[in-house]
Image (cartoon, rainbow, N blue to C red):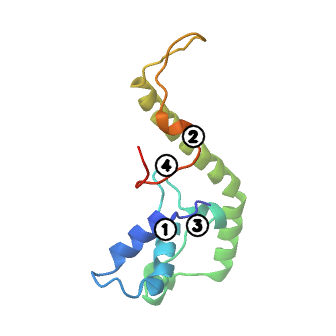
Amino acid sequence: MNTPTNRDIVVGIRARLDTYRKGWADELPQVLWTFRTTPKGSNRETPFSLVYSSEAVIPAKIAVPTQRVMEFNDESNVINLKENLDLLEERRDIAAIREASNKQKISKYYNQRVRERTFRPDDFVWRNKNTSRVEDTGKLGPN
C-alpha cells in the first residue's frame, strides 16, 4: 500500500483548513482517508482497493439513503466480497503492470534528453569541491 508522505499530508491539511491553521489534528483522519480512497495516476487504483479488494464507501454516503444503500443485500454482498477476493491478485498484477508501463514511459521521455558521456581512465574531469569536504559546515560555513 502506498503510504502518504509528510508532504502529501501537509498539502491535504492546508487544503482543508482556513488561514487560521488551528485544528489540524482533527483533520488528519479525513486527509488520510482521502489519500487512501483516491485513485492514483500511476496505476488507476486506490490503495484501499489494492489492500482490501473492494472500494470504500464514504461514511457520509451510508447515512444518506441512496440507491446503493437501499438495495443492500447482506447475502449477495458476502458473495460479491468473495469474488472480489478471488480477483484481488489479478487486480494487483494489472496495477503493477500499469505502474511499470508508466515508469517505462517516464524513463523513455527522460532518456531522450540525456547526452551520453563516456570517460576513459586518463581523461580530465571537473570535480566538485563540496564532495571533498569532510563535514558539512552548513550555510554559514566558509566557501
Residue at the image point whose x is 49% and y is 49% from the top:
42
Q: CA distance from mark 1 to mark 3?
A: 9 Å
Q: Amino acid at mark 2?
A: Ala
The disc placed on residue 3 is none
Q: Amino acid at mark 4?
A: Ser
Q: Amino acid at mark 3?
A: Phe
The answer to whether any part of residue 37 appears in the image is: no
The disc placed on residue 100 is 2
Q: Could you say whether the residue bearing mark 2 is in a helix, strand or loop?
A: helix
Dividing the image into 4 quarters, which one contains the N terminus? bottom right
Q: Nearer the viewer, residue 123 or 91?
A: 123
Check contact, mark 4 vs mark 3: CB within 8 A. Answer: no
* Residue projecting furthest to the front: 142
Residue 104 location (% of width, % of height): 52, 34
Q: CA distance from mark 3 to mark 2?
A: 20 Å
The answer to whether any part of residue 45 appears in the image is: yes
Q: Amino acid at mark 1?
A: Phe
Specify which label sits upstream in the sequence, 4 or 1: 1
Q: Could you say whether the residue bearing mark 4 is in a helix, strand or loop?
A: loop
Check contact, mark 1 vs mark 3: CB within 8 A. Answer: no
User: What residue is shown with label 4?
Assistant: 42
Q: Is residue 135 above or below residue 38?
A: above
The disc placed on residue 35 is 1
Residue 94 vs residue 109: left or right? right
